[in-house]
Image (spheres, grey):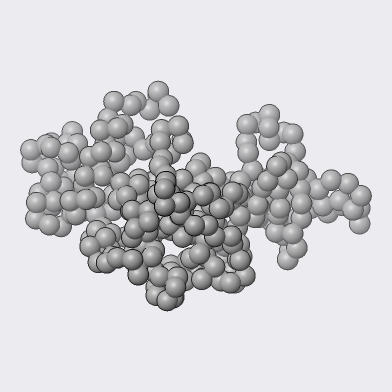
């Protein structure tokens, strides 16, 4: 047969070429020009229809409907977002973690938080922040294997994205999960306090019947990244707020300093962690004057 159509999943895209897993094989394809005209870019994780040709270029003909996608890192159809943060070297930022958990919840992605390099410091207080929020959390040490089995339990289905600041040990963690990854690891610059970008492209790695993505590291999310959460949606992106929403004295409550706010009451009673609420207030103040029509 000169050509055939197959359904597959994009596992990597680089330099205009896309690598699609379909029926047990990997095919190198180019995207049809129609996608450029529609301003659609194929992403790792996309389910696609491809045409495979014996004597010609293989092409991506159609991108099937996405259930979600991330802009930074660029991945589609994500089930779980694993946010990796080191205990130290580099020091953890709960604000960065909380931005990521909020983005995950807003896109119907399950957030999980992992604190790496647990041999360098106590993670109990950090873990408590996310346990109280109802977010899966654990600590790992790639040197001893601590926590690796728990991480494997977190990522048993669909597509999981590992992300976080550079230098936190994402590649080392993936190597511990499955040695077949053999991902390049890099040392953290003691002078800069951050690592080199050892992972340059989003790649999906198949483990049994699910996929794990390693992504380029980054240090922050911003409005330009396309992951902005508007002020009216933001409270719903903090799971620990859910039981209090709609119960405040005023329907216009911002949950920042308002009188009669049930979330502030829960904060005072210790049912919401101060660190999480501080992140919420920071994020709220960043977007409070932005209207949806301005995006």
Horizontal side of residue 92 vs 250, given as left or right: right
Horizontal side of residue 160 vs 237, given as left or right: right
- To which quarter of the image does residue 21 belong? bottom right
Residue 33, horizontal then vertical, whole percent: 74, 34
Above or below — where is 186 with respect to 99?
Answer: below
Number of numbered markers: 0
Residue 141, horizontal then vertical, whole percent: 40, 70
- Residue 16 visible in the shown view: yes
Horizontal side of residue 278 vs 109, given as left or right: left
Above or below — where is 239 with respect to 70?
Answer: below
- Residue 70 visible in the shown view: no
What residue lies at 53% left-to-right and 49% top-to-bottom? 197
Q: Quadrant of the C terminus?
A: top left
What residue lies at 62% left-to-right and 70% top-to-bottom? 180
Residue 11, horizontal then vertical, whole percent: 64, 55
What residue lies at 61% left-to-right and 55% top-to-bottom? 203
In this rendered view, identify the residue nearer to me: 129 or 142. Answer: 142
Q: Residue furthest top?
A: 294
In this rendered view, identify the residue nearer to me: 264 or 246. Answer: 264
Horizontal side of residue 166 vs 242, given as left or right: right
Q: Quadrant of the N terminus?
A: bottom right
Residue 193, horizontal then vertical, whole percent: 40, 49
């Amino acid at each position: 047969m000169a050509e055939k159509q197959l359904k597959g999943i994009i596992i990597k895209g680089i330099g205009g070429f896309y690598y699609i897993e379909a029926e047990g094989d990997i095919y190198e394809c180019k995207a049809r020009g129609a996608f450029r005209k529609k301003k659609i870019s194929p992403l790792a994780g996309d389910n696609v229809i491809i045409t495979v040709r014996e004597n010609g270029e293989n092409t991506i003909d159609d991108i099937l409907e996405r259930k979600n996608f991330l802009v930074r890192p660029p991945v589609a159809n994500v089930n779980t977002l694993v946010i990796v943060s080191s205990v130290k070297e580099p020091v953890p930022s709960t604000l960065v973690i909380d931005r990521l958990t909020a983005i995950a919840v807003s896109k119907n992605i399950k957030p999980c938080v992992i604190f790496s390099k647990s041999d360098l410091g106590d993670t109990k207080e950090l873990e408590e922040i996310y346990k109280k929020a109802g977010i899966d959390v654990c600590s790992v040490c790639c040197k001893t294997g601590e926590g690796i089995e728990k991480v494997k339990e977190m990522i048993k289905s669909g597509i999981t994205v590992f992300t976080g600041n550079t230098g936190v040990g994402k590649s080392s963690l993936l190597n511990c999960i499955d040695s077949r990854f053999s991902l390049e690891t890099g040392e953290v610059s003691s002078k800069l306090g951050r690592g080199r970008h050892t992972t340059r492209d989003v790649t999906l790695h198949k483990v049994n019947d699910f996929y794990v993505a390693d992504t380029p590291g980054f240090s922050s999310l911003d409005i330009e990244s396309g992951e902005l959460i508007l002020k009216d949606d933001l409270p719903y992106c903090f799971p620990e707020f859910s039981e209090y929403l709609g119960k405040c004295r005023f329907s216009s409550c911002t949950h920042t300093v308002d009188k009669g706010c049930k979330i502030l009451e829960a904060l005072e009673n210790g049912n919401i962690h101060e660190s999480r609420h501080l992140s919420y207030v920071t994020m709220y103040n960043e977007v409070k004057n932005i209207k949806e029509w301005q995006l």
